[in-house]
Amino acid sequence: MGDKDNLTAILTKVNEIKLEQKPIPVPGCHQVLLQMEVVGICGSDIHYWLEGRCGPFILKDPMVMGHEASGVVLQCGSEVKSLKPGDRVTIEPGYGCRRCEYCKTGKYNLCPDMKFCATPPVDGNLARYYVTEADFCFKLPCNMSLEEGTLMEPLAVGVHACKLSKVTLGSVCFVQGSGPIGLSVLAAAKAYGAGAVLVTDYMDYRLELAQKMGAFKTINTSGMKELEIAEKVKTTLGCEPHATFECAGDVTCARLGLHCTRAGGTVVLLGMGGMEMNMPFGAALVKEITMIGSFRYNNDYPEAIEMVRSGRVCVKDLVTHRFKIEETQKAYETHRDKVGNPIKIMIYCNKNWDGKPK
């Protein structure tokens, strides 16, 4: 390849992202080389940048950022049959060892040897060029944009959580937090037929988007106490929810799930909060509530893509800001400082990007 420009965004240490030129990687026999197009900023990226860790994952060495991404296939390995140069793809950013019990039973997201983009010590894909496993790239339908392809990562998180909690026609759901993950849960729940989805947050601009995306009602919980919120949720819905989704990484939200959810219901933990929490488990006992963790996704990308392709889910409104890769530092600062009410910030890696959504 004649082009030598592989500008790459590297988190060198806490609060320091540097742009460096890296060699253009060569795909193995089952891999593809991608021209990276659009990479989103995730909350986990911000945690690594500001704190050097996200939950149990700790930054010890410099790491390439980025895991929500789409790109165009440039070169295929010798054994790749499913893709060809020119294909537009969304990238599932993690793959397991393919040999352990978890991988063989379809729960590869729990593989102890998982290789996941921008999760220490694995490099991410915020670069001009990137090599990854071909079978974890999914072709985008002709009616889907590259930005929508990038958003399949958070939507797959929502799909996985809804499948775990068995959301179905008529389900009543309570989503705590209306950032990209909470909004993705809302979108997936509606696509699965949920009858009513209540969303809470303390930022009005996020709640406004939740309403636009189909929330039954929203509540700004700023300044409210735990049991006060629980009572407000029940009266607003007119009943207790079948499923509650904690998407904020906050112990109060996790506790609320046990206070609010109906007997026999499910509380799903998605937010990466503290490793230890003080919980009212007595409520779980007497109401037989199932509390379950939801970690990333497995085999959920095809459903996420079909939801958007078919028009059952619209993710376009999640995108609020766009930057080129040379502006990565500014993009991260925009997220941190909440400049312009950000929801999802996109970084364009292709040096030929013309400044328009793709």
Image: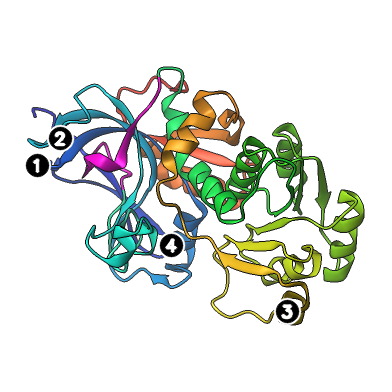
Q: Is the residue marked by circle 2 packed among few (<14), some (14-19), or many (20+) residues within 10 Å? A: some
Marks 2/3: CA–CA distance: 51 Å
Q: Nearer the viewer, residue 11 or 316?
A: 316
Marks 3/1: CA–CA distance: 52 Å
Give residue 313's position: percent from left, percent from top: 59, 31
Q: From which residue to which does the magenta span run? A: 125-141
**In the image, 43: left or right of 302?**
right
Q: What element carries label 4?
A: helix
Residue name at image x 10 percent, y 37 percent: 79
Quadrant where the image shows the C terminus: top left
Q: Name the residue under label 3.
A: 285
Q: Closer to the N terminus: mark 4 or mark 1?
A: 1
Instruction: Give the residue type at disc 4.
Output: Tyr
Residue name at image x 63 percent, y 48 percent: 179
Q: Mark 4 and 3 residues: CB-CB less than 8 Å, in contact? A: no
Q: Closer to the N terminus: mark 2 or mark 3?
A: 2
In the displayed structure, 276 sits above or below 236; it is below
Residue name at image x 86 percent, y 70 percent: 227
Q: Residue 48's mark? A: 4
Give residue 5's position: percent from left, percent from top: 19, 35
